[in-house]
Image: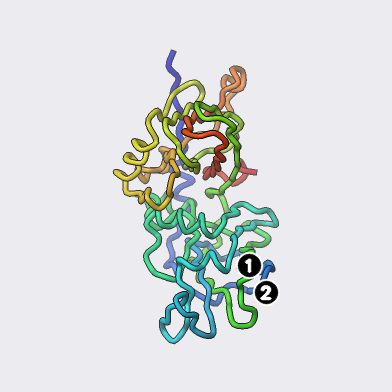
Amino acid sequence: MMRNVQRTGIGSELGKKLRVPVINRFLTDLATISSQYSDGTATADFPVGKYTYQLFQIGVRSSAAIAGKTIEKGGEHFVKTANLAEFVEEVSLVINGTVERRIPIELLLKLNASKGLNTTDGFAYMTFGGPHEFWEKAAEDAYMLGTGNLRDLRLDFKLKTAWADGTMFLHLGAEVAREAKPLEFISTMKSRRYSLGSAGEHSITDLPINADIARIYVFGTGLKRTEFEVDGETVFKANSYCVEGLNTLYGADVTALDDGVVFDFWRSGEVEKGLKSLEGDAQRKRNADIQIMLETAAANTEVQIVMELAGRYVTQQ
């Protein structure tokens, strides 16, 4: 008997409760930023309480021009987007002391480009619910990063050796609503790496099933046939190029992901089309799982799987 693949959702009443009715502000002086040193970690603390965040704008300013690597805008020198990864290795979103997103800058730039967020040279973005994520404003508001029930919120930056002490500075802008919305829904990111010793077909089964899933990115070289199965039901089954074509049809710039393949459940902009966690008693009884099947062209292929988890924050702990 064919099983229904369960979907995510917010609920109409909770959606109304989580609406953000006030005007969003854009500020570049909200964060309290620590000192920044080569090969060090810099922290940027953001206020919590009556602050609900839509996005963080991330950049690097330089007190002097760097040939070929900075642009001058409004009297300030900004490191070009293409050069950010030379100076910053990774950024982490830390909520109440727990890292919920740890993203190499190089990967963040690829994800930004695939979602159409690479619009202005010099900036990368970490977004929460938008822009361009959902068709419904209620869903966008629900996934904004509310801090009404948080103790602290910060971004950690791992800086590289090339960072110029005393002349380079983190730039952090925030689109924020002065609303004390609790953190209820969020998308977090978890990453795993797998070494595939031989060419041919491989099954990956140790993926999390306790949280809802928005997207799963699979990065690897020479990926051929792909298949994605949920609780015994096939959801994707195609050559990797065909999956890329599907994502392009829905507006994603898959060229930015190199050889990556995306199983995108939010591709239509509908929050209800996410993949619900596998937690029901019947599912537990039959050991329901999520499987990815990959066919690789070469031996000794390393595959990185980045899972964008969704749903209630408490389910992702």
Q: Are marks 1 and 2 in contact (CB under 8 Å)?
A: yes
* Residue 56 percent location from the top left of the image: 51, 65
Q: Is residue 35 visible?
A: yes
Residue 184: percent from left, percent from top: 56, 49
Judging from the image, what secondary structure is the residue with disc 1 in? strand
Observer-nearest of 247 and 199: 199
Q: Residue at x 60, y 21 (%)?
A: 287
The residue that appears at 43% across and 41% down in the rendered structure is: 262
Q: Residue placed at 55% from the left, 43% from the top?
A: 304
| Residue in front for this viewpoint, 75 or 30 | 75
Say what amino acid the circle numbered 1 marks.
Leu
Q: Which residue is mark 1?
A: 159
Could you tell whether 196 is left or right of 237 in the image? right
Q: Position of residue 135 (x, y in %)?
A: 34, 49
The residue beneath circle 2 is 37
Residue drawn at (34%, 36%) of the image: 242
Quarter location, residue 94: bottom right
